[in-house]
Image: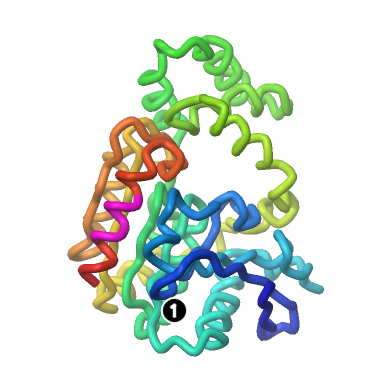
Amino acid sequence: MPTFTAVDGTELAYHLVGEGEPLLCLPGGAMRASAYLGDLGGLSKRRTLVLLDLRGTGDSGIPADPATYRVDRQVADVEALRAHLGLDRVDVLTHSAGGDLALLYAAAHPDRVRSLTLITPRARALGIDFTQEHRREAAALRAAEPWFTAAYDAYERIWGGSDADADWDAVIPFFYGRWDAAAQAHAALDVSQTNMKAADLYASPEAYSPETARAAIAGSGARVLILAGELDSGPLPRVAEAMANLLPGAELAVQRGAGHFPWLDDPAYFTRTVETFLRSC
């Protein structure tokens, strides 16, 4: 397992999976170990996935200062990894809450990013967030599912203020396009792979300056792909389109039948879409 040292002395780990040109992969969660990305539906057959374990997750060390879990503070970790790999410019793929880290990295180091592939991304860095109304809208699409009633009732309790583990467990099917054995096995590892204390610090409002980030990324010349899931609430496809509209030339793909983890729902479509984009960069 290769490692490198961050600017504050924290030892960080990354994992190399596959073959081909390197693709720097930043996990979401927030603060979930990169293992949940797997081989991204077989994308490793086309690119070498450089899977970073964010500080305090997976095989990476725990920082001395918990304040460095804040997403903008972790931009320096991504840049340190790029330098460690000896790459002049990088292709970056990220998922979910990792979208903010990738966007902030591209804003801080626009000359180092060749492309951004944002998979069902969060984009508070651009001034866009998800709402309870978005969750309701996407949930309504699943009304025919056998688990819907119990899951939706749990959502209502959460929106009413519940923080019960049982309620959060009950809504997990909404995040997958198919609630089958593969999805259930993937979801079962979430808690053990996530640094919850770090996740609470990750998205501090002070981390974001949307106008600055939008301007820096727009001027960078980096190619951008945003891939949304048809059934996902974070982001809804129309919200993903709003993200794309903020980034000149950004491409939007909406994967039919997909939830928040589209490489599990239709690996062939997912890998074909991402690789086609990367080949054009």
Residue at point 67%, 57% (across, down)? 201
The C terminus lies in quadrant: bottom left
Q: Nearer the viewer, residue 188 or 101?
A: 188
The image quarter in which residue 13 lies: bottom right
Q: Position of residue 141 (x, y in %)?
A: 36, 20
Asked whether residue 272 is drawn in magenta, I would say yes
Q: Which residue is mark 1?
A: 108
The N terminus lies in quadrant: bottom right
Q: Is 244 situated left or right of 111 in this image? A: left
- Secondary element under disc 1, as helix, strand or loop, is helix
Residue at point 41%, 36% (across, down)? 265
Q: Position of residue 177 (x, y in %)?
A: 42, 30
Asked whether residue 164 is drawn in magenta, I would say no
**Span of residues in magenta:** 271-276
Q: Nearer the viewer, residue 54 or 177?
A: 177
Q: Position of residue 244 (x, y in %)?
A: 26, 55
Q: Is residue 133 above or below residue 119?
A: above
Q: Main secondary structure of the magenta part?
A: helix
The image quarter in which residue 78 lies: bottom right
Q: Is residue 189 above or below residue 194?
A: above
Display colour scheme: rainbow
Q: Is 103 situated left or right of 256 in this image? A: right
Q: Nearer the viewer, residue 86 or 225?
A: 86
Residue at point 42%, 81% (across, down)? 109
Q: Position of residue 209 (x, y in %)?
A: 44, 66
